[in-house]
Image (cartoon, grey):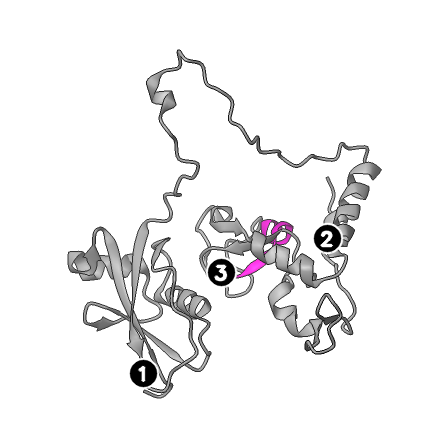
Amino acid sequence: MDDSWETDRSCSKISDSETLQDKNGNEDEPSLPLREFYPYIRCALCTGFFIDATTITECLHTFCKSCIVKHFFYSNRCPNCDIVVHQTQPLYNIRPDRQLQDIVYKMVPHLEEAERQRMCAFYKNRGLVMPKPVAVPSILPTKPLKQKQKDMMPQSVFTIPPELDVSLMLEFVGAENGIENYKPLERKYVRVSGEATIRHVELFIRRKMELSPNLQVDVVCGEHILQQRQSLREVRSTMGKNALQDGMLVLQFGLVLPGQ
């Protein structure tokens, strides 16, 4: 299958004059140029709006699914920040971001319908059958009564990849006086690759708490302030069992004003 459909669809753009307005046409609601949101809804690889938005779990950068999959054919690094996503299988560390894709479709008029039409034309021009969405049955089929007991036991629908070998507990110890307007860290427990660094932990905290880029995030393990370049596997090995709680590596962090 050639890339003509992928190339065509990745150029999904609209005029810079488009604005986001209230659906009811309420003139009291502010209107914002769509281009102000481009850094958050466009793929850095194809420069088009996200289609099948897919996020790298190591650094939380997002791309079109087809764009990042093709990129990983010849590289194992993130196109944005250049971190190693995975030494041998970078596709293990990407996840679909359906919420972001829904937002893009709502913000960009006719993008979803245009994408559907391009897909239909692609398969039709090549005499191929259009794939149907996978239907999830509302009622599970009844299993035979003679089935073995072990098969009747509930099974996990998700297996944690072996690369995610470090469990983190992130403890917020507070912010310096004068620091306000940040969100609480709702996701305290995280499972990541040991190859991830303290810099990746900081980026995760910044994104989840919506921190100003001017703030400094100090990450501490025990009584030691950690360096951004240190990997989590290195920290766990160096700090030993004293840094663990119920098998999880405990990292404390605080927010500091610049220059402190």
Residue kind at label 3, given as amino acid type = Leu
Q: Residue at x 77, y 33 (%)?
A: 128
* Towards the viewer: 207 or 143: 143
- The answer to whether residue 62 is magenta is yes
For marks 2 and 3, the one nearer the N-term is 3
The correct choice, above or below, for 136 with respect to 183 in the image is: above
Residue 150 position, x and y percent, is: 34, 21
Picture disc at residue 12: none
For marks 1 and 2, the one nearer the N-term is 2
| Mark 1 element type | loop
Mark 1 → mark 3, Cα distance in angstroms = 27 Å
Q: Which residue is mark 2?
A: 112
Q: Looking at the image, do the residues carrying marks 1 and 2 touch, with CB atoms under 8 Å apart? A: no
The correct choice, above or below, for 3 with respect to 254 in the image is: above
Q: Is residue 228 visible?
A: yes
| Rendered image quadrant of residue 135 | top right
Mark 2 → mark 3, Cα distance in angstroms = 24 Å
Please identify the quadrant where the C terminus is shown.
bottom left
Badge 2: few (under 14), some or many (20 or more) residues near its Cα, within 10 Å?
Answer: some
Of the two numbered discs 1 and 3 in the rendering, the one whose residue sits closer to the viewer: 1
| Mark 2 element type | helix
Residue kind at label 2, given as amino acid type = Glu
- Where does the magenta region start and end? 60-70
Residue kind at label 1, given as amino acid type = Glu
- The answer to whether residue 210 is magenta is no
Q: Which residue is mark 3?
A: 60
Q: Which residue is mark 1?
A: 176
